[in-house]
Amino acid sequence: MRFKRETEFQDTEIGKIPKEWKVVKLKDIATKIKMGGTPKRTVKEYWNGEILFAKIEDITNSGKYLLSTSSTITRLGLENSNAWLVPMNSLLITIYGTLGMVIINKIEVATNQAIVGVIPKRELVDVEFLYYWYLYYQPNWIKFVKKSTQPNLTLEIVANSKLPLPSLAEQKVIAEILSTVDRAIEVVDAGVVRLEGLKKALMRELLTGRIRVREENGKPVFHRETEFQDTEIGKIPKEWKIYSIEEIFDLYKGTTPSTKEDKYWGGDIPFVTPTDITALNEMNKIYLSTTEKYLTEEGRRSKSLRLIPRGSLLFTSRATIGYLAVNNVEVAINQGIIALIPKIKDLDVIYYYYYLTSVRKKLEELAGGSTYKEISMNTFRKLMIPHPPLEEQRKIAEILSTVNRAIELYREERVRLDRLKRGLMDLLLTGKIRVVED
């Protein structure tokens, strides 16, 4: 198999495609295209039967293939509704709410009215090629939506949608290339799931002291703890201490200079908001070096904002509560963030990053407010936290950071593969690059 750049194109209503390709309507290459239906919810005899019943959430919660559904209906429910049985290896396309999501059903399934089932003419079109074309095409559906309370497509719009049609052999090769990338993505996703599970298990055991770690001959050695003390935060190892947050950290809450004063903004002082920190957490990153907004020195002085020294913990205390970052540069912070500046020597900031992350749900429960949730400084400063020996803090932080870095690398690979897939779809599905069998 090799690739070649196409040089001979024809202009069509869907753009330039190779001269020998055709443009067809979906309905012309399908034996059946039909919306589903929903049996009456009030009739219990219609539900919880032997027929799998797909809804939009079943598709959004799946990948390329639909393998199961959260609901089932009975044969009686099928017969007394517009639902119909879509044979396996057909295409399902969503037309309400979430527009144009597409999936191949690997099971015989009935669907509700928000989903169109497409049975392809298999002598003309490969269902995998069809899947990738409509995955690539998805952003275009918005141009055809029926205006109503929510954007919807219609069966007619879907059936009359146009697509390029290479030879069946070329369709299958294109689909196989894209499937190879999808399989690589599945491996990466599975790796992230495994590592996330490992990270949670390690945090649960190491941060509570149920499993202890020490270094012997340059290697970490684990052992199960047997001697505990009872404290207000639960059982912890006998040699660990317990402090309030304010005993080991200086706490500082920021504010925001006037946004109407241009002279306060656009300087070189990073100004951190909760958005910066939550975005960092979504990327599985710990260290914050850049922000969306920057202050001038005049802006900082207008509110007497303190510069938070490098290596402090930044904690979101408002709206999205309990997200954390460690600043790699001096920063100013707004009113939605509490800075935790270490004030004792035997303290590892990264250990406390993981510890406070592990109790995020508890911190959310401590928040009050009606318009938006916020954990007050008085509540936060009195929070009691464990304090292992410094070397153990460092070893725990090192172990968790190693797993965290592995997750970060997997996610970076996922981004790279997504870009590769999008690029290949653009080249192969439009015929800009052709696949030639050797």
Image: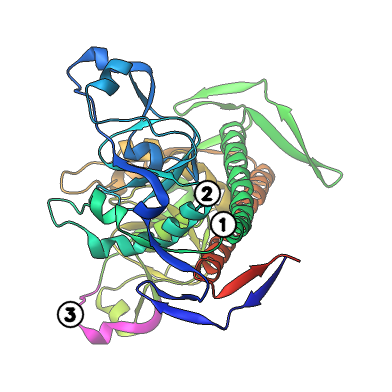
Label 1 secondary element: helix
Q: Residue 304: which disc?
A: none
Q: Are marks 3 and 1 in contact (CB under 8 Å)?
A: no
**Disc 3 + disc 2, Cβ < 8 Å:** no
Q: Where is 175 relative to 235, above or below? A: below
- Identify which residue is drawn at 37% across, 30% down: 85
The location of residue 54, given as percent across then percent down, is 36, 33
* Circle 2: element type: loop
Label 1 belongs to which residue? 168
State the image coordinates of residue 438 (x, y, percent, origin top left): 76, 66
Q: Name the residue under label 2.
A: 123
**Residue type indicated by callout 2:** Glu
Instruction: Give the CA separation, mark 3 to mark 2.
Output: 65 Å
Where does the magenta region start and end? 257-269
Which of the two residues, 268 or 145, is positioned nearer the viewer here?
145
From this viewpoint, which residue is outermost toward the bottom?
263
